[in-house]
């Protein structure tokens, strides 16, 4: 299926991987038990569990390809890109097992080492510039850190152990809805007992944390630099760690609460390896394709190019189904929305069915995003001055998340301050990945796909001005020029590009504000307050309408958990009648 996207000042044909049935409207039944709006990974997980639970379920995706942000697209002929999200880690293990995703074609490429930070500096004594390489080998990590500080090299193992203790303690909270406060504080005895059970994961978390509760409180509320400065002295190490505290977030390493974003990114797991991140064969659309295959194997109907116009709300105030853009009505007992809370309640839900106070609260959800994603096709592998490799052969560092313009925390702070003033960062933070180094299915032999996750760029430019194609081109050229300083020859190797600013991410993928997490991961929008205190249990003010996307607890990046929890909530409500 072809579409058209802007790539700088040119247009390119786009084909997609993993496209599920292009359905005519006649293929969609008029009645289902459950209808899911949006074929992102969480919506597909919800569909699989609902269908396994005996509910006839349909997924309606407006685009020509499934996956939402976890999608693969052939933007440049022969090059297959993870167009939006680009790494896998936080797919919950029980979902991986329950849905038999390996059986349904999910193949992973584990990365080790996983982080590479080259320096922009003159080499000493004819040696290359220094760099920092981190992976699972603790002795190697200490040797690498020792280039900058022997003290930090000795402190690093204890820091990682400390961080792991905090991250593991949170796991019970990832797989459960937040505590039912209303049930605990009022209602019938039966509801109070059920609400008491909802507090069990929080108790388990507290018991696991034990004496580390004060440390946990600090990391979720403090600026990450307050913590990193206590542990380390070398700028390259602190800046490399700080990137995980600001990635995808409109925050700086010196902003309160940035510590939680770091913790969020180290709590993942792949193939039973804690904290691991990997590539999916064929790109991130491979995850969505496997989940969809599992859902369909149980009987779910999954359709692309089915654009939902509005949720149908009956005279009794409950959801009765959806109406498509062409006026086709599809009736169901429950509706689950994989769209952002803003899209769900401001676009898809009749405003007359919601109270003015609720609508005002939805308007106040923070979706600020600093991210511009740039997908690049190159005809040769980038060769870094800090770790040169002969004959275009990949080195261990090529499989990593490559952190550029991350030599010091000051560089990150300045990039953030540029964006706060409405300007794209003049020296942007760049996280580069080259998944084709491990996955040969993504590019022709000798060529590669390069994915650039860049920060900080505003949604609107100075004076509220919208991005133009010239602005996109100028920012992309700035990013490429910075990469050129680390890896000379990069600019001349570019075959094609796809530049996605925050408004582009919103328009194409439905990410309000361009926010990859479906809402900021700040303390005021987590757990009991995600996305709002009145919406933390996946249920909406409209009976029978549920949120199953990343805008719900536990937030963006935790693949599958919101969909799983929303499906359980819907099934429980239907059982109770």
Image (tube, grey):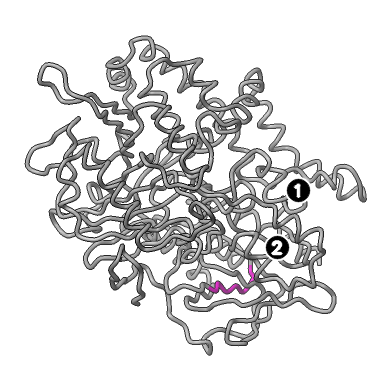
Dot 1: element = helix
Position in image of residue 291 (x %, y %): 47, 61
Q: In the rendered view, does 236 fall on the left or right side of 212?
A: left
Question: Which is nearer the eye, 469 or 101?
Answer: 469
The image's mark for residue 533 is 1
Quote the CA–CA distance across marks 2 and 1: 22 Å
Position in image of residue 563 (x %, y %): 59, 57
Q: Quadrant of the C terminus?
A: bottom right
Relative to 352, say whether 85 is above or below: above
The image's mark for residue 571 is 2
Of all residues shown, which one is farthest toward the bottom?
Answer: 26
Q: Quadrant of the N terminus?
A: bottom left
Of all residues shown, which one is farthest toward the front?
Answer: 463
Position in image of residue 226 (x %, y %): 54, 21
Relative to 31, say whether 66 is above or below: above
Relative to 19, say whether 506 is above or below: above
Position in image of residue 265 (x %, y %): 48, 38
Residue numbers of the magenta segment: 54-60
Of the two numbered discs 2 and 1 in the rendering, the one whose residue sits closer to the viewer: 1
The structure residue drawn at horizontal position 70% and vertical position 52%, both measured from the top left corner, is 364
User: Mark 2 or mark 1: which comes first in sequence?
Assistant: 1
The structure residue drawn at horizontal position 51% and vertical position 72%, both measured from the top left corner, is 61
The structure residue drawn at horizontal position 28% and vertical position 49%, both measured from the top left corner, is 435
Which image quadrant is residue 289 in?
Answer: bottom left
Q: In the rendered view, does 430 fall on the left or right side of 457?
A: left
The image's mark for residue 323 is none
Taking the magenta stretch, the answer to whether it contains residue 270 is no
């Amino acid at each position: 299926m072809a579409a058209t996207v802007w790539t700088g000042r040119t247009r390119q044909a786009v084909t997609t991987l993993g496209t599920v049935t292009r359905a005519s409207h006649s293929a969609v039944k008029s009645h289902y038990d459950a209808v899911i709006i949006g074929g992102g990974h969480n919506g597909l997980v919800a569909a699989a569990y609902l269908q396994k639970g005996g509910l006839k379920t349909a997924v309606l995706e407006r685009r020509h390809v499934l996956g939402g942000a976890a999608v693969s697209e052939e933007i440049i002929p022969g090059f297959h890109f993870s167009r939006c999200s680009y790494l896998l880690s936080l797919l919950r293990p029980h979902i991986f097992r329950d849905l038999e995703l390996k059986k349904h074609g999910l193949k992973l490429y584990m990365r080790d080492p996983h982080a590479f930070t080259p320096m922009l500096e003159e080499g000493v004594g004819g040696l290359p510039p220094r760099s920092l390489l981190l992976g699972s080998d603790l002795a190697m990590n200490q040797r690498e850190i020792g280039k900058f500080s022997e003290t930090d090299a000795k402190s690093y193992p204890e820091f990682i152990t400390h961080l792991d203790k905090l991250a593991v303690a949170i796991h019970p909270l990832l797989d459960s809805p937040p505590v039912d406060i209303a049930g605990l504080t009022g209602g019938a005895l039966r509801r109070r007992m059920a609400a008491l059970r909802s507090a069990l994961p929080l108790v388990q978390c507290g018991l696991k944390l034990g004496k580390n509760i004060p440390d946990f409180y600090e990391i979720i509320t403090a600026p990450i630099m307050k913590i990193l400065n206590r542990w380390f002295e070398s700028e390259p190490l602190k800046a490399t760690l700080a990137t995980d505290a600001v990635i995808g977030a409109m925050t700086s390493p010196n902003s309160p609460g940035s510590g939680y974003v770091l913790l969020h990114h180290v709590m993942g797991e792949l193939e039973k390896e804690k904290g691991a991140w990997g590539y999916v064969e064929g790109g991130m659309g491979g995850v969505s394709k496997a989940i969809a295959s599992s859902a369909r194997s149980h009987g779910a109907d999954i359709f692309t190019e089915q654009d939902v116009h509005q949720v149908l709300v009956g005279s009794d105030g409950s959801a009765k189904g959806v109406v498509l853009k062409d006026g086709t009505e599809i009736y169901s007992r429950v509706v689950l929305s994989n769209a952002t809370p803003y899209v769900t309640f401001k676009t898809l839900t009749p405003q007359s069915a919601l109270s003015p106070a609720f609508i005002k609260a939805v308007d106040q959800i923070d979706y600020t995003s600093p991210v511009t994603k740039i997908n690049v096709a190159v005809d040769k592998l980038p060769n870094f001055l800090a770790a040169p490799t002969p004959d275009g052969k990949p080195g261990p560092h090529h499989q990593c998340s490559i952190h550029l313009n991350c030599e010091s925390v000051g560089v990150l702070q300045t990039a953030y301050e540029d964006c706060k003033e409405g300007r794209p960062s003049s020296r942007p933070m760049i996280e580069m990945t080259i998944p084709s180094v491990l996955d040969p299915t993504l590019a022709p032999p000798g060529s590669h796909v390069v994915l650039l996750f860049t920060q900080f760029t505003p949604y609107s430019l100075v004076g509220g001005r919208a991005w133009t194609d010239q602005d996109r081109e100028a920012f992309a050229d700035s990013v490429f020029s910075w990469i050129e300083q680390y890896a000379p020859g990069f600019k001349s190797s570019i075959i094609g590009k796809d530049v996605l600013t925050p408004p582009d991410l919103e328009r194409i993928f439905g990410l309000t504000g361009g926010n990859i997490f479906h809402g900021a991961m700040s303390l005021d929008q987590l757990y009991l307050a995600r996305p709002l205190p009145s919406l933390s249990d996946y249920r909406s003010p409209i009976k029978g309408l549920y949120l199953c996307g990343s805008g719900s607890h536990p937030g963006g990046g935790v693949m599958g958990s919101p969909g799983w929890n929303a499906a359980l909530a819907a099934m429980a409500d239907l059982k109770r009648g």
